[in-house]
């Protein structure tokens, strides 16, 4: 990591300490890091790590609190420094963000959380984040994402040949979780999540989406887009459940299925649901789905691994080229 020349750093700190606004807020806005002459303050760190700090305060024993808080602080500060480096590079290369892009991001964020735009902003306000502040954060995130797309993501191509090789050499050698690994899609006719006004309408929606799965559309994507159950946020993934832990009607629905098959639509508690079996691990016997069923998830897995590796290498280069100083 390159360091600021001592005279340059001293001059910068002198200017900061002599500035009247800084003097008044010295105990609040203490500078804790300098990234290419751009400062990160204690207040910024406290704001960025507020949720994590609150979580450990509630869940970590008092004797371990100081150590755990120091670990979290170090991680939050590292992430802030990395974000600052990416933001600076985005500005340098003129990856700008328009107000319309920020509006679209807010709308998308609200939809992903199944909230109205107004409700999302209300929840942010309850956490002390104003709409103006949130827009600034989103604008910065979008600019960083544009740069990363250009610098890394757009350059990654996972060939089908590579994915098939992974399927043969890795996927089929990995022990699947014990039980039936299931994906789930369901539609309610009561409750705030329900888009159907009647029980029959919910059943018809379930049958319609099941037909899309049978026609070859990706189960996880359909679950995320349409399912009204809690598992939708995970692409319908329920994890693995043993037959002995299933209710008798669910066991009857699934016990004869093989990996890749989709169950019929069945009525459950205030919803109609259907399932897809991914893997089966019972009595020491492993059964896997055909490559075509997991091709998309394997491509995603390989892409994420490649993305992580390239991003780490790129960030290492940015840090080595930067002037970074962390202050006690």
Image (cartoon, grey):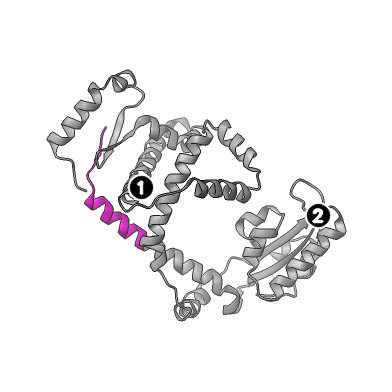
Asked if the magenta segment contains residue 214, the reply would be no
User: With respect to residue 252, does 40 lie above or below?
Assistant: above
Q: Which residues are magenta?
A: 310-328
Circle 1 is placed at which residue position? 87
Asked whether residue 171 appears in the rendered view, the answer is yes
Quadrant of residue 311 in the image? bottom left
Q: What residue appears at the point 62 percent right and 64 percent down from the top-left corner? A: 221
Asked whether residue 60 appears in the rendered view, the answer is no
Q: What residue appears at the point 50 percent right and 75 percent down from the top-left corner? A: 173
**Picture coordinates of residue 112, whole percent (x, y):** 61, 51
Q: Quadrant of the C terminus?
A: top left
Asked if the magenta segment contains residue 323, the reply would be yes
**Picture coordinates of residue 298, whole percent (x, y):** 51, 71
**Picture coordinates of residue 304, whole percent (x, y):** 45, 63
Label 2 crowd (10 A; few <14 / some 14-19 / many >=20): some
Q: Along the polypeptide, which appears first: circle 2 or circle 1?
A: 1
The kind of secondary structure element at disc 2 is loop
* Viewer-nearest residue: 260 or 155: 155
> What separation in Å lies between label 2 and label 1 (alpha carbons)?
44 Å
Circle 2 is placed at which residue position? 196
Q: Which label belongs to residue 96?
A: none
């Amino acid at each position: 990591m390159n360091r600021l020349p001592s005279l340059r750093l001293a001059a910068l700190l002198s200017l900061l300490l002599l500035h009247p606004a800084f003097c008044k807020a010295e105990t609040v806005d203490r500078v804790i890091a300098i990234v290419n002459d751009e400062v990160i303050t204690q207040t910024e760190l406290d704001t960025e790590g507020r949720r994590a700090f609150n979580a450990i305060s509630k869940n970590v024993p008092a004797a371990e609190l100081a150590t755990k808080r120091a670990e979290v602080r170090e991680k939050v500060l590292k992430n802030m420094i990395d974000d600052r480096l990416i933001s600076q590079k985005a500005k340098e290369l003129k990856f700008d963000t328009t107000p319309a892009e920020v509006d679209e991001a807010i709308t998308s964020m609200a939809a992903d959380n199944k909230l109205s735009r107004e409700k999302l902003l209300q929840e942010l306000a309850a956490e002390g984040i104003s709409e103006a502040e949130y827009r600034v954060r989103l604008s910065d995130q979008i600019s960083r994402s544009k740069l990363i797309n250009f610098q890394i993501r757009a350059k990654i191509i996972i060939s089908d040949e590579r994915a098939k090789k992974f399927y043969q050499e890795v996927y089929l050698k990995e022990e699947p979780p014990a039980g039936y690994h299931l994906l789930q899609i369901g539609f309610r006719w009561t409750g705030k999540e329900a888009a159907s006004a009647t029980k029959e309408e919910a059943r018809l929606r379930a049958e319609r989406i099941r037909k899309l799965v049978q026609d070859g559309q990706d189960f996880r994507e359909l679950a995320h887009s349409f399912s009204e159950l809690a598992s939708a946020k995970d692409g319908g993934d329920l994890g693995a459940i043993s037959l002995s832990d299933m209710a008798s009607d669910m066991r009857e629905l699934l016990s004869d299925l093989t990996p890749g098959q989709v169950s019929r639509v069945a009525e459950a508690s205030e919803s109609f649901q259907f399932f897809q079996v991914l893997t089966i691990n019972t009595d020491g016997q492993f059964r896997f789905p055909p490559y075509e069923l997991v091709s998309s998830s394997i491509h995603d897995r390989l892409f994420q691994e490649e993305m992580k590796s390239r991003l780490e290498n790129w960030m290492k280069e940015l840090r080595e080229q930067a002037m970074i100083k962390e202050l006690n």
